[in-house]
Image (tube, rainbow, N blue to C red):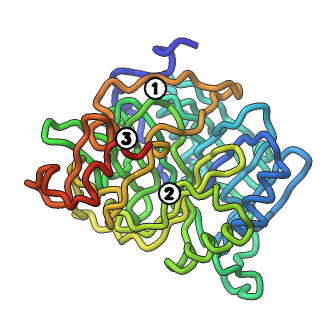
Amino acid sequence: MSTKDYVMTTIPTPKSPPPDVLRCAYMELVVTDLARSRAFYADVLGLTVTEEDDHTVSLRTIDEFIHHNLVLRQGPIAAVAAFSYRVRSPEDLDKAVAFYTELGCRVERREEGYTKGIGDSVRVQDPLGFPIEFFHDVQHVERLGWRYDLHLPGALVRLDHFNQVTPDVPLAVKHMEDLNFRVTEDIQDEQGTTYAAWMRRKPTVHDTAMTGGDGPRMHHVAFATHEKHNILSICDKLGSLRMSDHIERGPGRHGVSNAFYLYLRDPDGHRVEIYTQDYYTGDPDNPVVTWDVHDNQRRDWWGTPVVPSWYTDASLVLDLDGKPQPVVARTDDSELEVTIGADGFSYTRKGDDEGELPAWKQGEYKLGNQL
């Protein structure tokens, strides 16, 4: 499949109304060692196994009542098979078919049972190259919020968001706005280049974010905890298990979203964020927060530098046949290069120059100094 077959330079707004998306609901990850991944997500992170067989494991968070928030599927290459959203009604599946058919995208209607616990669904290869699923009917399971006897100190309570890597962030934002997603925060420079944007359907900071980079790829999937101390407990547990190498970045507090965070890498390198305490965004006049790409507190409110792998590494995504999508290079400026690369410069207070940073901070954001 050629690049132009799945990545558009412009995406028209369909005349067909979009499906009414409620929230991000689950991600389907392909993993190369199912037993090892099951142990990481269930035994280490504490997700509850709803159902499993020799080829797949379905897991959910403590407060969830639908069948799963994560599906692990054994496969030959680590990748993402589906970013899945729940829609308001069964009729929204018909809307999804019409919406994406009008865009010329590949669309597949999948009957109940294709994914365990999920009713009829629609999977599409969207104009940005991502495998997206929509569903409504779902098997209900026990919500474990009251089962305190089962809660671990680092209990994951819900799926919070996805983060997608795409070469053209404004193009991606425009397409998601056609799906009635709303921007809550973004990162720009004075020239108007957009480096990332956070977009939501549920009234939080985001259901997904579009991060500029070589794509389409999956940057991370994020699960929420109730409190900051739950994230610290996960760090302590990983240390006790001599698994601290799974910690890529954090813990810390984001400037963007104002949330407390931790980034982990699973056994295949898929990135998982543990996230808590962002803010309500449900009012129709909720203001968009725009961050300067050179503000070193945008990614970490405490000013801790971002590790280079966070900007460069991401998971492949699959087409509807299960084949890896080609990765297209970003042509706009790279956030890594303009902030921590060889010529990058970040500041704590706008107007500072590099020489005004304290001696112990100078060079900290330069890739060469980190290496």
Quadrant in which the C terminus is drawn: top left
In the rendered image, the vertical position of residue 15 relative to residue 35, given as above or below: above
Q: Which three-letter amino acid code belongs to the residue tagged 2?
A: Arg
Q: Which three-letter amino acid code belongs to the residue tagged 3?
A: Leu
In percent of width and height, residue 85 lies at 56, 50
Q: Specify the label residue 11 is tagged with.
A: none
Label located before the other in sequence (2 or 3): 2
Please give the name of the residue rendered at 28% of the width and 60% of the height, measured from the top-left corner.
360
Is residue 81 at least partly visible in the picture? yes
In the rendered image, the vertical position of residue 46 relative to residue 95, given as above or below: below
In percent of width and height, residue 148 lies at 71, 87
Q: Under tag 1, what secondary structure?
A: helix
Discs 2/3, front: 3
Check disc 3 and report the residue beneath it: 367
Pick the residue in front: 218 or 89: 218
Quadrant in which the N terminus is drawn: top right
Check disc 2 and report the residue beneath it: 249
Please give the name of the residue rendered at 77% of the width and 56% of the height, measured from the top-left corner.
58
In percent of width and height, residue 198 lies at 36, 52
Please give the name of the residue rendered at 81% of the width and 53% of the height, measured from the top-left corner.
57
In percent of width and height, residue 112 lies at 76, 46
- Whole-angstrom CA distance, mark 1 to mark 2, is 41 Å
Check disc 1 and report the residue beneath it: 102
Q: Which three-letter amino acid code belongs to the residue tagged 1?
A: Glu
